[in-house]
Structure formats: structure tokens, C-alpha cells
Amino acid sequence: MDIDGDNFLDLVSGGFNSTPSLGYAPVYVMKGGTDKLKYKTADHLHTVSGKVPLMNSASCTKPCFADLNNDGLLDLIYGDKRGRFFQFNGVKSKQGLSFSDEGKIIRFSDAKTLKLDAGYSSPHFTDWDGDGDLDLLSGSKKGGVFYFENEGTPEDALWAKPLVLLSPLEYSKTGGAASPYLIAGPDPAKTPQYVTCVTTVDYNQDAKLDLVIGDHSTLGEDYESKEFYTNDIGNVWVMLRK
């Protein structure tokens, strides 16, 4: 996206550690230029007054942008290691798009914190049900894809409890509570595995949104033993909507 309004696309990324005192931040931006394959050194993404948009010690962040209050400005939303979602509203600035100093944690319609128990939330917003407002999709540490319907309006979202579009993996009992292993899916070469991220596009041009899923997978000759090994890879999957 063009974060600074200079007509060049910029690259935005989350961060593993979000401790400002140590020089870390939850969201980074690498500004683009005339060479579409080169970006400037990563810098912290700041709020309108130069603050780091951090809440509740969020880490392992995954940012996205969407106009959640229908004011014509993109808002910053990111997920974190604990499965939460944080929102900083977009505001106008001399440098282009910026974000409010004060953020908020996104909540269900019953005011409870909207959270994925599996952790590693990775938000993506789209009108999944075609009713004119933005719904929330997310992957998780355990994989899968979760759908949170917006039962409110384009200006004031009310988030329903999640529906599972793609089932996550399970934990085995062999790893123990402190460090459980994830059980591999039926075949890691044929289905998305764990630490999933999701976006949507009409991949086959049938007027229906399809899921595009990234994952973290571990393949090996004996993956059927239900433990992960060191042959780590990442895949991109397309799941066509019926």
C-alpha cells in the first residue's frame, strides 16, 4: 500500500518483538520508490504524533489495513501471538495516511475480547457474506481459517462468534502442556498446515471470493508419525468457494 501518499507502493510488515525500549515495534514500513524491486531500510510505523502503535505488549504481530469505521481512511489492525486484534483508526497527516495515538482492542458484540485461543491471529477484512460491510477472517497458530461475521454496520461493527471455514490442527498429548506438538493434517503436501495467514480473491472469476492461504509446514519421509521435523517450508494454497 502507499502509506505516505507519494504514489509508490510501500511494504508493511509485523514484528516478532514489540518492545520500544529495545528498539522494536509492532509494525514496520519499508518505503518504495521508482524501482519496484527495491525498498528503503525498514522503519517503525508511527502514529500521527510519532508514537509506536503498541497495546498490551503485543508480539508476533501481523498487520493489515481496512476502513472499519467507513470514514474513507484506512485503519491499522494487527493480530498478535495471543490471538488478539488491535485497531488504530486512520487519520490524515502532512505525510499522508497516519493513525490515531490511542488504539483499542477489538471485541465481540457482547464486549468480550475477540480472541483466537490458538494464538497468532492474522486478520484480513472482506465482505465475505456480501451484505455490504466488512467481515473478519483470520488464520492461527494451529492453522485453519476462522470467519467472524460483522452483524453491525459499515460504520459500527458488531462481531459474531467465529465460524470455522477450514479446520485447524489438533494438539497431541505427547508434547505435554508446556510444549505440545501439533498433529499434522492428513497429508502436509495436500492441505494447509499450521501458522496460517489468509486473504481473499476471486481466483477462478466465478463472482465468488476464494481463500488464499499461506502456512508453515514440515515435510519428511515419516510425517505420518504425527510429529514435526526440521524440514520446514511455507506453502500458498487456493481453496475455491462452492
Image (spheres, rainbow, N blue to C red):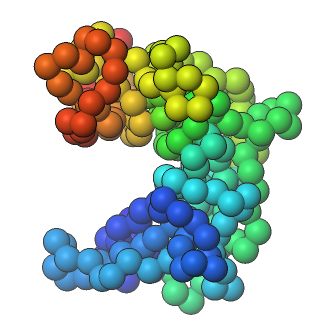
Decide if residue 207 is in sight here.
no
Residue 169 at what x, y percent from top left?
Answer: 44, 19
Image vertical order of residue 210 relative to residue 3, above or below: above
Residue 112 at what x, y percent from top left?
Answer: 82, 35
Image vertical order of residue 156 relative to residue 104, above or below: above
Image vertical order of residue 130 relative to residue 46, above or below: above
The answer to which of 185 and 44 lies nearer the viewer is 185
Residue 226 at what x, y percent from top left?
Answer: 33, 15
Decide if residue 43 is in sight here.
yes
Image vertical order of residue 103 relative to residue 46, above or below: above
Residue drawn 35% across the image and 67% down it:
11
Residue drawn 64% across the image and 30% down it:
117
The answer to which of 88 and 15 lies nearer the viewer is 15
Q: Quadrant of residue 159?
A: top right
Residue drawn 16% across the image and 79% down it:
35
Compared across the picture, whether 202 is left or right of 23 comes to left
Residue 142 at what x, y percent from top left?
Answer: 48, 28
Quadrant where the C terminus lies?
top left
Compared across the picture, whether 155 is left or right of 37 comes to right
Q: As drawn, which residue projects farthest toward the bottom? A: 94
Q: As drawn, which residue projects farthest toward the right? A: 110
Quadrant where the N terminus lies?
bottom left
Residue drawn 58% across the image and 56% down it:
59
Q: Quadrant of residue 103?
A: bottom right
Marker count (numbered) = 0
The answer to which of 75 and 82 lies nearer the viewer is 82
